[in-house]
Image (cartoon, grey):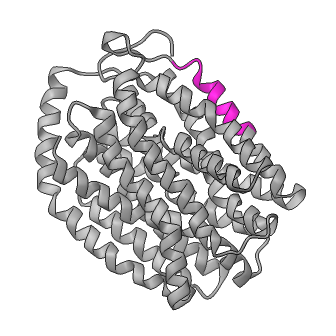
Amino acid sequence: MKRIPLVILSIGHLAVDVTGGAIPAILPLLQAEFHLSYLLVAAIIATSNITSSIVQPVFGLASDKAAARYLLPLGVLLAVAGFAFVGLAPTYGALLVAVAVSGIGSAIYHPEASKSASYVVGQRRATGMALFSVGGNIGFALGPITIIAIVAALGIRGTWIMVIPGIVAAAAVAAVMPAIARANAAHDQRRAQEPGRSRPGAMTLLVSIVAARSVVYGGLLTFVPLYAVNVLHRAPGENGLLLSLLLGSGAAGTLVAAPIADRFGKRVTMLVSLALVAPLLAVYILMPGPIGIAALALSGACLIGTFTITLLLGQDFMPNRLALASALMIGFTTGLGGLGVALLGRVADLFGLATVLWSLVGIAGAGFVLTLPLRVTEPRGRESAIPGHVAPGL
């Protein structure tokens, strides 16, 4: 494992995803500022998800065709610059443009960074990739606390200050590009000796599973803060802590799930994790006090803890298209999730936020059911996929 490039890629991941974590925390403020319906509030998250995800496979394809490491610092810069303008936007339309620019920066960074991380993770792939993924988890967790602190000190127009750490992170990422290039060359030599075979059936099923998970994830980030303020009558400032707890537990779940997956298999770890999400969310809805908040945090750990596992499985199912596989797992499915969140915004307008949260319980259960037929194998009998090993069936 090449720790320095991996850590720097994780820091870049943090800088990009802190903007994604910050946006949900200020949704109630943006709703009040622009007098938005729930549908228009959901459209903000949908814009972020779609621009950061639907276009991601385009950058993944470009990355697989030729080395595009310059996308790493560029993605970081665009992500933070777009978010910096969110607080300065004079109209709702300008706000959506700022969110879109930030999302495109994320779309640029993630495929290339995920592919680059796969070159430097070493033999314990789940553990190594978790170190990369946890940067994004921490970024999302820090986002709500960071933006609430900025708004408290400088007002909503203070988002411009996010550019400063973004520039530092982009410079650090640019500095490790030569080390990544050397790891890339070594990987290509190994791949020429041990070519892998794609599994489109398994990949299609995996995309469906991750899309369902993305709807639940995006729905929690969007509607839990609104539910806390508008239904439970909590103070808007508490949303930063609530979202950070949810996302912070997800970062912990990523680090815990990765070594378990390396030991017992990716499929088993994913099945157990996804099986727990729906009942934990139900506990939060039924008991929204301390017990419910603890259940919400655990649901975040189980849900977000599977991100690294599905990323690795996607790369295993498309071993010759690592960036495209990463874009599908991180980006395309998130875009589908964003569309689902937009539809849930309409459900909220018609039937209320409680109905939306119960819908997320049902979607989480459906994601678990979809995981049951997924079959992958690896040496020593563990049910997990590695490049070059093909299981029967999907």
Q: Position of residue 381 (x, y in %)?
A: 37, 10
Locate residue 116 relative to residue 141 in the image: left or right. Answer: left
Quick one: 61 or 35, which is closer to the camera? 35
Q: Main secondary structure of the magenta part?
A: helix
Q: Residue furthest front?
A: 290
Front one among 20 and 63 = 20
Name the residue rendered at 72%, 49% in the picture: 284
Residue 394 on image: x %, y %: 51, 16
Instruction: Please say if 349 is above or below 58.
Output: below
- Up the image or down, 317 lies above or below 232; here it is above
Q: Which residues are magenta?
A: 362-374
Side (left or right) of 243 relative to 161: right
Horizontal side of 25 relative to 142 (left or right) equals right
Residue at 32 percent across and 29 percent down: it is 319
> Residue 79, located in which quarter of the rendered image?
bottom left
- Going 34% across and 71% down the picture, which residue do you hit? 77
- The answer to whether residue 337 is magenta is no
**Whether residue 368 is visible:** yes
Is residue 103 among the parts visible in the rendering? no
Seen at 53% across and 68% down, the residue is 144
Residue 50 occupies quadrant: bottom right
Q: Position of residue 158 (x, y in %)?
A: 49, 87
Q: Position of residue 392 (x, y in %)?
A: 45, 9
